[in-house]
Image (tube, rainbow, N blue to C red):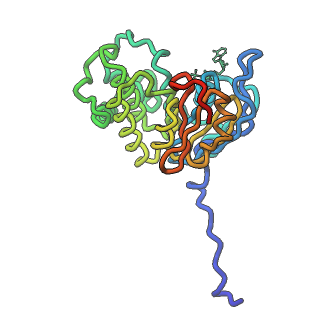
Amino acid sequence: MTASSVIAPTVADPVTTVPALDIRHLTVHYRQNEALHDVSVTINVGEQVAIVGPNGAGKSTLLKAIAGLQPITSGEIRYFGQERVAPNEIAYVPQRLQIDWRFPVSVSDVVLMGRVGRIGLFRRPSQHDRQLAQRALERVGLAAFANRQIGQLSGGQQQRVFLARALAQEARLLLMDEPLVGLDIPSQDEIFRTLATLRQEGVTVLTALHDLQQAARYFDRVMLLNRSLIACAPARAAFTAAHLVATYGGHLHLLQSGDGLLTVADSCCNPDPDGGL
Ligand SMILES: Nc1ncnc2c1ncn2[C@@H]1O[C@H](COP(=O)(O)OP(=O)(O)OP(=O)(O)O)[C@@H](O)[C@H]1O
């Protein structure tokens, strides 16, 4: 073999090969209750991943542990190759019910709060910060609501305000806990449009969801969780009968759709409760 016929090995690009999240053997307890058991998964930079699983599967716990809001029992989480991450690098949007919407702040105040990590708690926002907040509100279609009190918005609009806050924050990692709960279809579409914008900007997104069709349609990979990690793969590979049964047990009916992808319906909503697979 001549030297010229040898193909030089590709030099790994350290920027692109370092994952956004590298979770190793993560276990989390609430007192005696083990909410997450030995979860190991890697999320690449710019990926959008849906976390699905039954009630109590540990979806919220996983998001909170990643956000640093929930102490972990054992294991480790690395962020962009580091043990620690600056708070402004992560945006966490909790479930709607966990937010006190009566809080007397305007929509633009909430979005500006996304800048606090960058400007410091006691410094006034600059013109640049205000412009970023304004642009973020425009991008989620809420510029006209900037001066409204946050509690006066609809559920979908409130969720979009929190997305705008994440945009203004210029976070690299966005964690959302069931952002679609209680939203009508147009509001859900607006959220997915905003996620598409974040995709263009290379923001890594992890979202807890209940709708498996949406998880399959809008996300690069689906993480099936039931205290342990069952799978984390593109929908076609994730939604196998074995994975779905391991995740949801006997509570689901599996359906074969036209394109061969398995989809599921909760047995509580099925008109024929005795219907099998
Ligand atoms: N603050 C808490 N104190 C004690 N136990 C908790 C707490 N939060 C959650 N748990 C328990 O941890 C387990 C995982 O809960 P978690 O909220 O993470 O699940 P989930 O998948 O997000 O559920 P859901 O779909 O209902 O929101 C459950 O058994 C739950 O009861």
Q: Is residue 2 toward the left or the right of residue 48 in the image? A: right
Q: Is residue 277 toward the left or the right of residue 187 in the image? A: right
> What residue lies at 56% left-to-right and 48% top-to-bottom?
236
Report which quarter residue 243 is drawn in. Answer: top right
The image quadrant where one finds the C terminus is top right
Labels in figure, total: 0
> What residue lies at 43% left-to-right and 12% top-to-bottom?
100
Q: Percent from the top left, x then y, of residue 76?
A: 71, 36
Q: Percent from the top left, x then y, of residue 30?
A: 71, 17
Q: Is residue 44 toward the left or the right of residue 231 in the image? A: left
Please tell me which residue lies in front, 248 or 11. Answer: 248
Q: Percent from the top left, x then y, of residue 102?
A: 38, 9
Report which quarter residue 104 is drawn in. Answer: top left
Please tell me which residue lies in front, 113 or 66. Answer: 66
Say if 242 sits above or below 36 in the image: below
Say if 50 sits above or below 258 in the image: above
Residue 151 is at least partly visible in this image: yes
Residue 115 is at least partly visible in this image: no
Q: Quadrant of ligand 1?
A: top right
Judged from this view, the residue extending furthest toward the left is 144
Judged from this view, the residue extending furthest toward the bottom is 2
The image quadrant where one finds the N terminus is bottom right
Q: Percent from the top left, x then y, of residue 260?
A: 53, 50
